[in-house]
Amino acid sequence: MKKIILITSLFLIYTFQALPNELKLSEEISGLKSPWSISFINESKALVTEKSGNLILVDFISKKIKKIEHNLNVLEDGQGGLLEVLYYDNQIFISYSENLKKGKTSTSVAVAKFNENSLNFKNIFRAEPPINSGYHFGSRLVIKENLLYITAGERGQGMIAQDPTKHPGSIIRIHLDGKIPKNNPKFKDKKNWLPEIYQIGVRNPQGMALSPFDNKIYLTNHGAKGGDWFGEAKYGENYGWKILGWGGTNYTGTKIGPKWMPGYTKAIKYWVPSIAASSMIIYKGSEFREWNGDALITSLRDQSLRKIKFKEGKLLNEKIIFKGKIGRIRDIEIQKSTGKIILITDQGSIWILQK
C-alpha cells in the first residue's frame, strides 16, 4: 500500500479589508493542486478533491492535509478528473471522469464507507455512452430525501442533450445504492427516457444545491459564448440545449437558437456575456443572516462571488459580493457551525469569507 502523505500546509497569508460591508476574506490553506470540490466531515475537517485524482483530508485547526488512498480509475483529461466529493451519513459519494480506455471517459459516481486512510469505492452510476472528449462533465452531487441527484454534462456533443436515450446533457436521479426510483419520469409519461434521467437539455451544470428553505434543487450551468444561467431542476422537463442558446452564440460567433421559448424550462437568471458560473449554495447560516435564502454563485471567468435574491422562480436582484480578488473560484461550502463561507480556487487555495 502506498504511504499516506502528511503535508503541513501554508495558511493565513493575508486578509483583504476592502470588501463590502466590512467583510473579511482570508486565505486558510494553500498549496493544493487544481482543487475541485470540498465537503465537511465534521466541524474542523473537510475532504477536498484534486483534479489529478488525489483525495485530500484538510484539518482547519492544525492546517495539515493528508492524502487518502482510493481505488478509482480516474483519467484527468481536459476538464475531467476527480471532481465532486460529498460526505453524507459516514459515506463518501464522489464523481469523476472514469477511464474507459482508448481515450473514452464517462461522468461516473461511486460510493465508499468513510475511512481517513483508504477508501474502497464502488460505482453506482456511469453516464452512457462513454465519449472521447475532455469537455463538460458536469459532476455536481446533491442528496435530497435519500435520493442522489447528479449533473451529467453533454461532453461537448451539443444535441446529445436532446436525446433521452443517452445520459450526457441531463440531470440524473438514483437511490444512494444506485438503484432506480420507480417514480422517475420514464415510469410516468417519458417512456423513451433512460430510467435514471430526471431532466434533459443541460450543457455543463457545475453547480447544484438543495435549498433548506423550499426543499427545491437549484443549479448553475455554463453556456457557450454567453448564456450561463441559474435555475431550478424540474422533474421531466427540458432546458433546451442545443435548440436554445440561452442568449449566447457558438464560439465561432454563429447563432445557436433563441434565448428561451415556450415548452422549455426557463431559468431564473441568464448571464450574457458569460461569467463561467461554477458552484453554488443556497445560504443558511448565522454569519450572514441577511443572506438567508439567497443563492451564492461562484464564477471562473470573472472570478466573482455573486448573491442572487429570488422568490418563486423570479429574479429579484443580483449583487456582486467581490470580484477579481482570489482567482478562479471553483467551489463554495458553508461551515455549518459558524455560517462562514468556504471557497476553493483553481489556484490551489482555500479561503474563508466572514464578517
Image: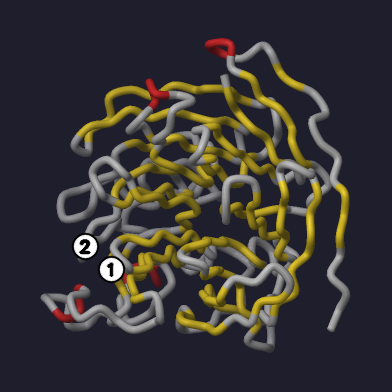
Which residue: 30% across, 76% down? 164
Q: Residue at x 20, y 81 (%)?
A: 182
Front in this rendered view, residue 289 or 71: 289
Can you see residue 93?
A: no
What type is the residue that disc 1 sits on? Tyr
Residue 314, above or below 252: above
- Colour scheme: secondary structure
Q: Does 254 appear above or below 185?
A: above
Tag 1 residue: 198
Give the quarter of the figure containing the N terminus.
Answer: bottom right
263 lies left or right of 49: left
Is 342 rendered above or below residue 84? above
Q: Secondary structure at mark 2?
A: loop
**Relative to 277, does residue 200 appear above or below in the rendering?**
below
- In the image, 16 versus 88, the foreground residue is 88
Q: Nearer the viewer, residue 130 or 336?
A: 336
Q: Disc 2 vs disc 1: Cβ atoms closer than 8 Å?
A: yes
User: Residues under labels 2 and 1: Cα distance?
Assistant: 6 Å
User: Which residue is the extreme one toward the left?
Assistant: 189
Please give the residue where the numbered disc 2 appears in the rendered image. 235
Residue in the image at 58% along x and 11% along y: 22
For disc 1, the neighbor class at 10 Å (few under 14, some 14 to 19, many from 20) is: many
Residue 26's image quarter?
A: top right
Residue 82: x and y in percent read: 65, 66
In the picture provided, is 161 more to the left or to the right than 11? left
Mark 2 or mark 1: whose residue is earlier in sequence: 1
The amino acid type found where label 2 is placed reads: Tyr
Name the secondary structure under disc 1: strand
Residue 73 appears at what percent x and percent y? 68, 81
Checking the image for residue 153, the label placed there is none
Residue 197: quarter of image: bottom left
